[in-house]
Image: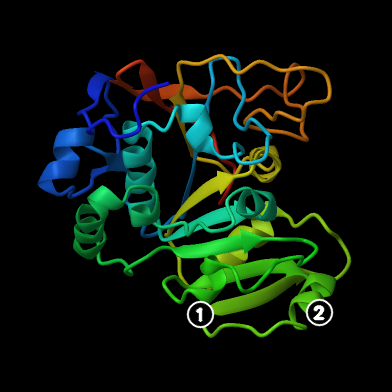
Amino acid sequence: MPARSRALRALQPLVIARRGQILPLPRRLARLYGALRLPAARTRTYVYSNFVTTLDGVVSLHAKGHATGADISGFSAEDRMVMGLLRAAADAVIVGSGTLAADPQHLWTPEAICPELGRDYARLRAALGMAVAPLNVIVSGTGALDLRLPVFAAGRVQTLILTTTAGARRLARQSRPGSVRIHALHRRAIAIEPGAILGAVCAGRRGQRILVEGGPRLLAHFYRRRLIDEQFLTLSAQLAGRSNGDGRPGMVMGAHFAPRAALWGTLSDARRGGSQLFLRYAFASTRP
């Protein structure tokens, strides 16, 4: 496993995206990542996802204390840098309740994943005219959430919980911190449609950048509805392995696309960081 204390190294460009607006990265971020182009999402919402996977397609070891992407990336400093950068460019970060359960002390902010670059991320957000931190959106059909967790109670981020009517009633039994909003999207259904999620996140404001960090089932719902514009993917140089019934998930779970409705992406960007590849694929979105 790579040493956790190893200093950040600049990524080596292999294929560079040529479309989109070049973001005004501070000098250190520009040196480490290179140029980052994203669509100028001011009139049309841009939805992107970020995942890290092993060579054999595992995104979580599904083991106590080893369920997050850090074990998948080998605690890669470069992967943390990219994760922070993509969060820094986002108006909102969407995660499911399973992702929160895997890392309950986490905040979905740039500096939470890569604190050594926290000031650089803050400068980028300021240059983009964005809020100090992206809106943290937690999707939970059941509402089985502990509102004492840092993402709700720390007061460092604005948090939106998207749930059902029954989930909202369940959450109403707890004291709600002032930084938390609860919005019920469906009366009966447990599965919350991704179109409704985007509608709630973007209500009253067009043209946001929305980052979907998962988990795999939530991401599958977004892909099923063709709502992902681009997928950022870190390919980690490890084999994790699987056995029957071990619960180790792939990047999308709960939906079949191939062979009847295969989703093909177009490679638009590739960079190398040590033995890891940082890939970016564009997908055809049906979102108006």
Give the class, few, some or many, for how many residues have Cα within 10 Å of label 1's Cα (few <14, many ≥20).
some
Q: Separation of disc 2 and disc 1 at Cα?
A: 18 Å
Who is closer to the viewer here, 218 or 74? 74
Tag 2 residue: 169
The percent coordinates of residue 99 (x first, y second) are 62, 49
Q: Residue at x 52, y 28 (%)?
A: 72
User: What residue is shown at x 65% (from left), y 76% (from top)?
Assistant: 182
Residue closest to the eye, 246 or 65: 65
Q: Is residue 12 visible?
A: yes
- The local secondary structure at tag 2 comes to helix
Which amino acid lies under the numbered mark 2 shown in the image of this protein? Arg
Relative to 269, say whether 91 is above or below.
Answer: below
Residue 179, which numbered label? 1
Mark 1 secondary-structure assignment: loop
Nearer to me, 61 or 56: 61
Q: Residue at x 60, y 15 (%)?
A: 56
- Residue 261 vertical position relative to residue 223 in the rendered view, above or below: above
